[in-house]
Image: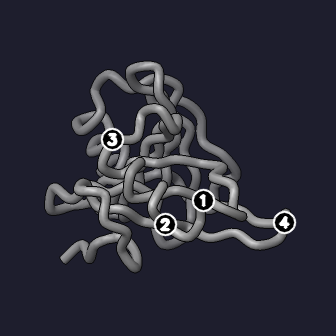
Amino acid sequence: MLGQAKAQFRKIPGEVTDAFRKQYPNANGASWTDKLSYFQVDFKLDSGGYLAKYDKTGAWKGSERTINADQLPAQVKDGYDKSIYTDTWKAEEYKVMYSPGNKMWYRILVKKGGIQRKYLYFNESGKMTDGPPATK
């Protein structure tokens, strides 16, 4: 379950891998990356792609799950459809984001003309926000 580690600068602390195993006991194919200020693990769960971030003490910093457009809740899809980004921008990626404090939101990556890209954030009720909610 721990999987492989990619180009590590330092060993993944046991507190980090233990926290991951406790939080995601059914995860498969875990692959760790040292991002210097945190450790990131990419993994599969319930046939979906996830990533989670932990600090060096094993404190969870957040997770994200890749989804398809048809998995967006109706309110979020409606919020996106009403935005100015549906005419000339193309939605490329959909994520459900989770952060400490039981916060959840949706992030849609839109691109225009191959150069411009923007992340759009939506809360659970479909309202577009300036960014992810504060974690404190």
**How would you rate the neighbour count of disc 1 (Cα within 10 Å): few for under 14, some for 14-19, many for 20 or more?**
few
The amino acid pointed to by label 2 is Ser
106 sits to left or right of 98: right
> Marks 1 and 4, how far apart in space?
14 Å
- Mark closest to the chain's N terminus, 4 or 2: 2
Which quadrant does the C terminus fall into?
A: bottom left
Q: Residue under circle 4?
A: 113
Could you tell me which residue is drawn at 32 percent across and 22 percent down?
26
- Mark closest to the chain's N terminus, 2 or 3: 3
Q: Secondary structure at mark 4?
A: loop
The residue most toward the right is: 114
Which quadrant does the N terminus fall into?
A: top left
> Marks 4 and 2, how far apart in space?
18 Å
C-beta proximity under 8 Å, tags 3 and 4: no
Indicate which label's residue lies in the foreground, 1 or 4: 1
The amino acid pointed to by label 1 is Thr
Q: Is residue 14 above or below residue 132?
A: above
> Marks 3 and 4, how far apart in space?
27 Å
Q: Residue under circle 3?
A: 73
Q: Residue under circle 2?
A: 83
Q: Nearer the viewer, residue 30 or 113?
A: 113
Q: Nearer the viewer, residue 69 or 44?
A: 69
Q: Secondary structure at mark 1?
A: loop
The amino acid pointed to by label 4 is Gly
Q: Quadrant of residue 4?
A: top right
